[in-house]
Structures are given as C-alpha cells and as structure tokens.
Image (tube, rainbow, N blue to C red):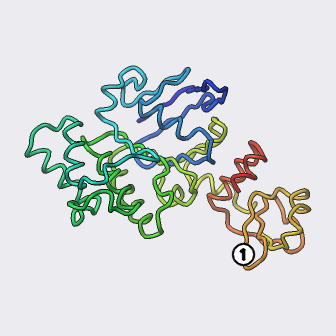
Amino acid sequence: MLSISNLSKTYSNGVQALRDVSLDIPRGMFGLLGPNGAGKSTLMRTIATLQDPDGGSITLDGLDVLRQKDEVRKVLGYLPQEFGIYPRISAEVMLDHFALLKGITNDRERKEVVQALLHQTNLWDVRRRNLGTYSGGMRQRFGIAQALLGNPKLVIVDEPTAGLDPQERNRFLNLLSEIGENVVIILSTHIVEDVSDLCSRMAIISQGRVLLTGEPQKVIDTLRGRIWQKAIDKSELPDYQARYEVISTRLFAGRTVLHVHSLENPGTGFEPVDSDLEDVYFHTLRQADPKVAAKAA
C-alpha cells in the first residue's frame, strides 16, 4: 500500500503544483488522470524521491518515502515521461549495466535477470540491436524492463503511451497489466481510455487537487442516465454552451456532436447515451473549473 497524505508543493515561480493531495493506492493498476499541467508529473517525481514537497507525507509498506529515500529506491521502478538512452549501445548491454547499478553484482544472476526481462518485454529477438534503432514502443518496453530490475514493489509510469501507434500501445498496456498483478503500478496519463481499460482504481487531479477517486466502473455508474447526445452545426455551439451543461464536443461527419449532462431530457433532438469514463472525466473537470474543462475537451 502506498499512502499519500496532505502533500503540497509550490515552485519558486509561485505555481502551486500540489494542494493537500491525499491518496491511498493498493496493489494493482492505479490510474492518475488529469490534463496537462494538473500536477501529475510533480506528484510522480515526488513519489519517486526526485524532489521534496513543501509539506505532507508518503509511506510505502512502512517506509517513509521522504526520509528513507535510499531504501525506497531499492524497491522502486520508474519510467518517466521522457528518458534518455545511449543510442549506440544494445538493449542487452544497457540493461546489464542498469542491473549492475541496481546492485545485482553476481554475473550469473544478472545475466538470468536481464534475459528474463528481455523475454518478458518481448525484446529478446532485438536485444543486440542498438537502442537508437528502436521504435517508440520498443523504447517504452525497454524503459519498463529497466524499471522492473530488482523486483520493485512500486512502479511509476508517466504518460507511457503518448505517441505510440495503436498496436504498440496495446502491447505496452498488456505488459503493464501483467506486471500489475503483483505490485503497485501508478499509471499517470491524460488518456482516459488507458485508465478505463486497465485500472482497478483511479483518481482525477487538476490544478494540483484531487477531484475524484474510486473504481472506474463505479464512478461511471454515477452518471448513468444523465448523459445526452446531439449533433449540431458548429455555428450553433455557443448557443448550446450557454443553455446546457455541455461537457464535451467532437467532430463527426462534418457535424459537432455534443455530450450534455442533464437529469432529464434536455429537449428535441437529444438522445440518451451510455456514460463512460471520458464523460466522468470532463464532467468532473467542468464542475471544478469550466475553463480547465474547455481546454481539456
């Protein structure tokens, strides 16, 4: 169990990135949803012992994350949003080097660990290729391989599927799902579908505050029967936004499709639709701050 209590962080430029964030995160996949600038990366870096908060506490199975950093790093795997690689070194050699840095000094044990992780991340056949020749998805899988060194209790992945094609995204998410059966995995993302597909619990964060926590299906059920859809001309959008609680819009076949939150039928032309996590996400953001929700949509 990872427990976060009243975590706060304000940067020197005055930006308040975290505002009394409290979360209890059990073993399994936990999704952290939020728009860009919500504070997700700040929270991830703080949990990963890379920066200190102004106040609050974090514990991981009895370890004080903020005071016992060296002990925490022994049981932590971290895949940041952007991580550097040595393009002219093979995945096998690089992973062996990381394993040595992680404290796996026995040559035979290290070789077995490296081979097992290359198989697990489906990189065995390309293990001798230089990392500079890898696709985006292959690099992400290599990133997970290095994050899994040392059998971590906690794995943090920050925006891991951004820029991946659908096939690589599915392969990567399936890999995360398999890993998440035994450890705490925090998946920080702004892609709603990643969370709805994989995570047993989730939170929505915006402007440094936790707005909602729960199980994806249960929070989706709170909007059951309250989401209505209608296709309109783009020119009509300002009028509908003034009259209804429009939570999201999208273009389809040259028309603008609205999703509106309402306890009853909003009027002619609206049809009920099944709510999903995207509706929950935009509705939650809109309740907190309509301007943030408009940018996210």
Give the residue at the far left of this rendering.
108
Q: Residue furthest front?
A: 88
Residue at the bottom extreme of this rendering: 253
Q: Is mark 1 on a helix, strand or loop?
A: strand
Residue 110, quarter of picture: top left
| Residue visible at 39% across and 31% down in the picture | 60
Snapshot quadrant of residue 223: bottom right
Pick the quarter of the image with the C terminus.
bottom right
Left or right of 293 on screen, residue 54: left
In this view, 39 is above or below 258: above
- Other residues around mark 1 within 10 Å, as few (<14) / some (14–19) / many (≥20): few
Q: Which of 49 and 264 is in front in this view?
A: 49
| Relative horizontal placement of residue 76, taking residue 16 as reference (left or right) | left
Q: Where is residue 25 in the image (x, y as percent from the top left)?
A: 47, 39
Look at 76% across and 43% down and name the residue there: 289
Q: In which quarter of the image is the N terminus?
A: top left
Tell me which residue sits at (64%, 58%) in the image: 278
- What residue is shown with label 1? 252
Q: Which amino acid does label 1 sit on?
A: Phe
Q: Where is residue 45 in the image (x, y as percent from the top left)?
A: 47, 35
x then y, percent, for residue 116: 19, 55
Residue 36 versus residue 245 in the image, above or below: above
Residue in the picture at 55% in, 20% down: 55
Q: How many marks?
A: 1
